[in-house]
Amino acid sequence: MIVPTLLTNTPQLRDQIRQATPLLVPDVVRINFEVGFDAMGFASIFFNIVLADEATRPARLRHAAQRIALTLMNHLRTDENGVHAYFNFRSQSEAARIDDPAWAEMP
């Protein structure tokens, strides 16, 4: 199985995501991710994105989610690198209530 270069260097990928994060302020609180393969076997990156509570209001959520997804996909060039990107979102208050390491602040 061929793994795209984008997914083989996690520290570099983490740096690229950190570089994109300021572009997503004030909507994004933090971005966590995992790399792997989706159900169809395609190399993928799975994002868990904690949004500021204000960004999850019905009037803003769709626009914020689209902007975040497109910004990350363009910054990481996922399509060009042959990587599928998947996005999950939670509000900051929801993430604080739920004890789930996939959504916790990374060290």
Image (cartoon, helix red, strand yellow):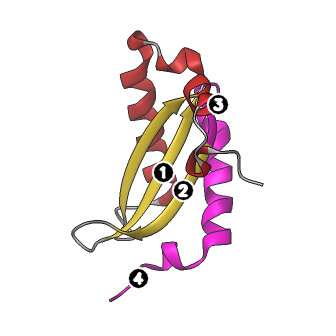
Q: Mark 3 belongs to which amino acid?
A: Ala
Q: Badge 3 local density, few (<14 within 10 Å), some, or many (20+)?
A: some
Q: Nearer the viewer, mark 4 or mark 2?
A: 2
Task: Judge left or right: residue 54 versus residue 45.
Answer: right
Q: Which residue is mark 2?
A: 33
Residue at image mark 1: 47
- Residue 67 is situated, as x and y percent measured from the top left of the image, at 44, 33
Type of amino acid under label 1: Phe
Image quarter in which the C terminus is found: bottom right
Q: Are marks 4 and 2 in contact (CB under 8 Å)?
A: no
Classed neighbour count for the residue bearing mark 4: other residues with Cα under 10 Å, few (<14), some (14–19), many (≥20)? some
Q: CA distance from mark 4 to mark 2?
A: 17 Å
Return the disc, 4 or 1, that comes first in the chain's sequence: 4
| Pointer 3 or 1: first along the chain | 1
Label 4 element class:
loop
Asked if the residues shown at circle 2 and circle 1 are in contact, with their CB atoms under 8 angstroms apart, the answer is yes
Magenta region, mostly helix, strand or loop? helix
Labels 2 and 3 touching (C-beta < 8 A): no
Q: Give the image location of residue 26, x and y in percent.
A: 64, 25
